[in-house]
Image: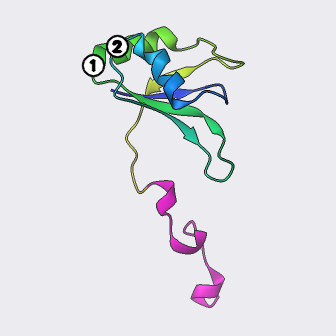
Amino acid sequence: MKLFVAGLPYDLDDAELEEIFEKFGTVTSAKVAIDRETGKSRAFGFVEMPDRAEGTDAMESMNGISLGKKPLVIKEAEERSGPPSSQRRPGGSSGGFDRDRRGY
């Protein structure tokens, strides 16, 4: 079960996130999202737990608990549809008209 965890303290790292969730069972991976430009935490992350019952227990037990200033929001991660944001169109275009390339 993959969990989305929001509201993390900005100074929390992967190892600390894993340690928090290990109290509920086996953790396959724990990853805090890092902003590529600043190198700082984006205050959310993902935790994978192979046992669905343990993942559900962690989600129900930790949801709403504050580790810092904000309460945690934990839910089952949704599968992404489409390419990751790093694989957008070349040149940074998000699909809008590009006057230089189309001659408009």
Tell me which residue sits at (39%, 11%) in the image: 24
The quadrant of the picture occupied by the C terminus is: bottom right
Q: Tell me which residue sits at (61%, 25%) in the image.
A: 8
Residue 13 on image: x %, y %: 57, 30
Q: Amino acid at mark 1?
A: Asp
Callout 2 secondary element:
loop
* Vertical arrangement, residue 9 with respect to residue 98, above or below: above
Residue 83 as seen in the image, left or right of residue 91: left
Depth check: give the residue in front, 23 or 2. Answer: 23
**Label 2, label 1: how far apart the Cα atoms are:** 8 Å
Q: Look at the image and tell me in which quarter the N terminus lies.
A: top left
Dot 2 or dot 1: first in sequence order is: 2
Residue 60 image label: none
At label 2, counting other C-alpha atoms closer than 10 Å, the crowd grade (few under 14, some 14-19, many 20 or more) is some
Q: Judge depth for marks 2 and 1 and give the one in front.
A: 2
Q: For residue 42, which quarter of the picture?
A: top right
Say what amino acid the circle numbered 2 marks: Gly
Q: Are marks 2 and 1 in contact (CB under 8 Å)?
A: yes
Q: Is residue 59 above or below residue 90?
A: above
| Pointer 2 residue | 25
**Viewer-proximal residue, 97 or 60?**
60
Nearer the observer, 98 or 27: 27
Element on which disc 1 rests: loop
Mark seen at residue 51 = 1
**What residue is drawn where x is 46% and y is 23%?**
18
The residue stretch that appears in magenta: 84-104
Q: Is residue 97 magenta?
A: yes
The x and y percentages for residue 38 are: 69, 49
Residue 33, image x, y percentages: 55, 39
Position of residue 6 in the picture relative to residue 23 (left or right): right
In the image, residue 32 lies in the stretch drawn in magenta: no
Residue found at the very far bottom of the displayed protein = 103
